[in-house]
Amino acid sequence: MKFNEYRKTFQISFCLNINRYSIAIVEDYPEFSDKVFSIINDGKEITVIAEEGVRLSTISKEKYFRLITFNLNLPFDLTGFLMHISTLLARKNISTFVISAYSTDHLFVRESEVDQVIELLKNDKLREGMGDKAVEHVKNNFLITRHLMDYIKLFNRYIKMN
């Protein structure tokens, strides 16, 4: 199911967690507790997302993130939801750290940008308009058909030159 179809029947709902979080690369696994949101081992490094104050054997650390959780049970076959949200925020130069769980998604955003993110997520007209623009932007700039047309134009110019 595509997000554009899904959003016609469901209102996007989210909540802001009151805690501050750090995202860190660590040497060792921390003791798991309710203050540790996530532990990720991708084979190259161990990344931990934890509430501020949790002791970690830190190699590198980014601080002062807030957690936004979407209050939706997203269908497992849903496509485009994170693209919509990420593009909406990227257009305002807001970076995110995204974690997807089985049935919903979570955004970690810098504390200094959380008010702006909430305003964007709450503003239906702005969000929908920017979402439509985001889809159009992806279609016009990143789909293979656009790249193929660029190659055809390039080959035609090359053939005319020779």
Image (tube, grey):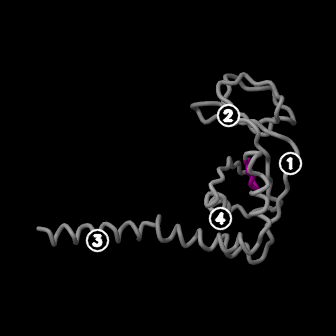
Q: Amino acid at mark 4?
A: His
Q: Within the magenta stretch, is there residue 25?
A: no
Q: Badge 2 local density, few (<14 within 10 Å), some, or many (20+)? A: many
Q: Amino acid at mark 1?
A: Asn
Closer to the camera, 149 or 73? 149
Picture disc at residue 153: 3
Picture disc at residue 147: none
Whether residue 2 is visible to the viewer of this picture, yes or no, is no
Q: Please state which of the two labelled residues, at mark 2 or mark 1, is closer to the viewer.
A: 1
- Residue indicated by mark 2: 47
Question: Relative to 119, is 92 on the left or the right?
Answer: left
Whether residue 40 is visible to the viewer of this picture, yes or no, is yes
Query: What whole-number distance in Å separates the C-alpha atoms at marks 4 and 3?
Result: 30 Å
Instruction: Indicate which disc, 4 or 1, sits on the residue closer to the N terminus.
Output: 1
Residue 59 location (% of width, % of height): 65, 24
Q: Secondary structure at mark 3?
A: helix
Which residue is rendered at x = 62% and y = 57% of the image? 90
Query: What whole-number distance in Å separates the C-alpha atoms at marks 4 and 1?
Result: 22 Å
- Residue indicated by mark 4: 84
Q: Secondary structure at mark 1?
A: strand
Residue 66 location (% of width, % of height): 79, 46
Instruction: Indicate which disc, 3 or 2, sits on the residue closer to the N terminus.
Output: 2
- Residue indicated by mark 1: 17
